[in-house]
Amino acid sequence: MDAAPTRVAIVTFDGFNELDSFIALGLLNRLRPQGFTAEITGPGTHLTSMNGVSVEVQRPLEWANEAEVVLFGSGIYTRAIAENSSLMDRLTLDPLRQLIGAQCSGTLLLARLGLIGNMPACTDSTTKPWVVQAGVRVVDEPFHARGPVATAGGCMASQYLATWVMLKRAGLQATEQALHYVAPVGEKDEYVKKLVGVVQAFIAE
């Protein structure tokens, strides 16, 4: 029997942080045998990162509305993007049928879309004042989730979002195998135990 598809939209905009988009994409595509496909999703045909790396958009922005999982990274223009109604109105996400996550300034986009509500959220120190201004309670944690919505703080926190998606959609064994493969040599067991331990605390049995 083929694995149920898990299409992941890595929502990305100009000025994006490479660590946010590429780490999540790389980790989640380790589970292709389990039906995972993670793709860079955004407006236009090409995007340029905060460090000048140009990438081709694999899926249009609206594809995020269809995907089973939607992850928002951060970038240097996120505040302007959050205020761009013509762009944000193209997104009609539904936490009843999608897993939705964000990190750093991407949390501001979740707030703009009304997806955080009264849930505590994580972000980076630069974005924190904007997220607080949007009415969100920010916690000093690397990862926090409630049901189908999760946020993470810090560039390397993309690994927590990816772990959360893998655990929710593929289970513990597949998640541990994928993380073990990418973990630093000599630290593999400790690395996997830490990531899974942090995320599992937010996943109901």
Image: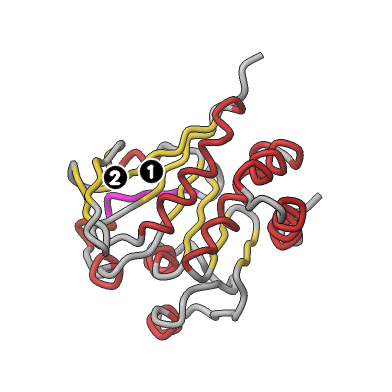
The amino acid on which the numbered mark 2 sits, given as a three-letter code, is Leu
Which mark, by number, is residue 140? Answer: none
Q: Is residue 125 magenta?
A: no
Looking at the picture, does residue 190 appear above or below residue 108?
A: above
Residue that protrudes farthest toward the top in the picture? 1
Can residue 173 be seen in this snapshot?
A: yes
Q: Hey, which quadrant is residue 201 in on the image?
A: bottom right
Q: Where residue 168 sits in the image (x, y, percent)? A: 66, 44
Q: Residue at x 72, y 43 (%)?
A: 176
> As rendered, which of 120 and 175 lies closer to the eye?
175
Q: How far apart are the two marked residues, 1 and 2, measured between alpha carbons?
A: 6 Å
Task: Between residue 79 and residue 114, name the one nearer to us.
Answer: 79
In the image, taking residue 178 as reference, residue 30 lies left or right, namely left
Residue under numbered circle 1: 64
* Residue 61 - label: 2
The answer to whether the residues at label 1 and label 2 have Cβ atoms under 8 Å apart is yes
Residue 203 in view (yes/no):
no
Q: Residue at x 38, y 81 (%)?
A: 130
Compared to residue 193, the image places residue 27 above or below, namely above
Q: Name the residue: 19% across, 57% down.
A: 86
Quadrant of the rendered structure where residue 76 is? bottom left
In the rendered view, does 60 fall on the left or right side of 10? Answer: left
Q: Position of residue 94 (x, y in %)?
A: 48, 48
How far from the left and from the top, in percent, is residue 107? 44, 67
Q: Nearer the viewer, residue 34 or 121?
A: 34
Report the span colored magenta: 89-94
Mark 1 residue type:
Ala
Crowd rating for badge 1 (residues with CA inside 10 Å; few <14, some 14–19, many 20+): many
Secondary structure beneath label 1:
helix
What number of labels is visible? 2
Residue furthest to the front in view is: 186
Q: Position of residue 196 (x, y in %)?
A: 72, 54
